[in-house]
């Protein structure tokens, strides 16, 4: 892992019948910080909006977007979150993958 690396993940998902959202669902990557429990992420351009209730998606997270952030924890530890959007700009995490620790 380095500043020029991009983390790519293929994730399989399935929303339960009772999971509904008028604002949709999305998946994005976040990285562990040096402040326990806090994460930081790449730009919203790397967020994947789910088009179907089940399927496979590809999520990319270019580390260049977070590498120089002094809060970024090392070794790089990633999480992928499935968000039920409650408004156009916020939501509730309903599932996650991680932590995934990468060697630097």
Image (spheres, rainbow, N blue to C red):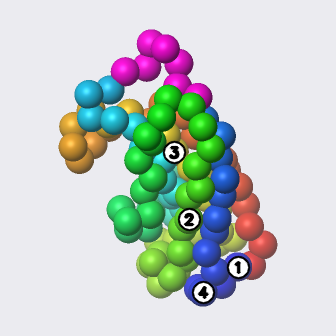
- Is residue 104 found left or right of 40 in the rendered image? right
Residue identifier under label 2: 60
**Mark 3 → mark 1, Cα distance in angstroms:** 21 Å
Q: Residue at x 41, y 47 (%)?
A: 49
Looking at the image, which is closer to me, 46 or 32? 46
What segment is highlighted magenta in the picture? 14-20
Looking at the image, which is closer to me, 87 or 70? 87
Dominant secondary structure (helix, strand or loop) of the stretch shown in magenta:
loop
Secondary structure beneath label 3:
strand
* Residue 43 coordinates in the image, percent (x, y): 38, 68
In this view, the mark in front (2 or 3): 2
Q: Residue at x 43, y 20 (%)?
A: 19
* Residue 35 coordinates in the image, percent (x, y): 49, 60
**Mark 2 → mark 3, Cα distance in angstroms:** 13 Å
Residue identifier under label 3: 81
Q: Is residue 66 magenta?
A: no
Residue identifier under label 1: 1
Looking at the image, which is closer to me, 81 or 9? 9
Secondary structure beneath label 2:
strand
- Is residue 78 found left or right of 91 in the rendered image? right
Tell me if mark 2 has few (under 14), some (14-19) or many (20+) residues whose alpha carbon lies within 10 angstroms of its own: some
**Mark 2 → mark 1, Cα distance in angstroms:** 14 Å
**Mark 3 → mark 4, Cα distance in angstroms:** 23 Å
Secondary structure beneath label 1:
loop
**Mark 1 → mark 4, Cα distance in angstroms:** 8 Å
Q: Residue at x 64, y 80 (%)?
A: 5
Q: Is residue 17 magenta?
A: yes
Residue identifier under label 4: 4
Q: Quadrant where the N terminus lies?
A: bottom right
Lower position in the chain sequence, tag 2 or tag 1: 1
Lower position in the chain sequence, tag 3 or tag 4: 4
Lower position in the chain sequence, tag 4 or tag 2: 4
């Amino acid at each position: 892992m380095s500043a020029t690396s991009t983390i790519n993940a293929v994730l399989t998902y399935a929303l339960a019948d009772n999971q509904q959202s008028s604002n949709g669902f999305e998946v994005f990557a976040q990285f562990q910080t040096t402040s326990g429990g806090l994460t930081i992420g790449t730009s919203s351009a790397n967020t994947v909006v789910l088009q179907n209730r089940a399927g496979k998606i590809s999520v990319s997270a270019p580390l260049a977007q977070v590498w120089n952030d002094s809060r970024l924890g090392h070794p790089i530890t990633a999480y992928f979150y499935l968000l039920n959007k409650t408004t156009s700009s916020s939501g509730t995490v309903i599932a996650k993958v991680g932590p995934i620790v990468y060697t630097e």
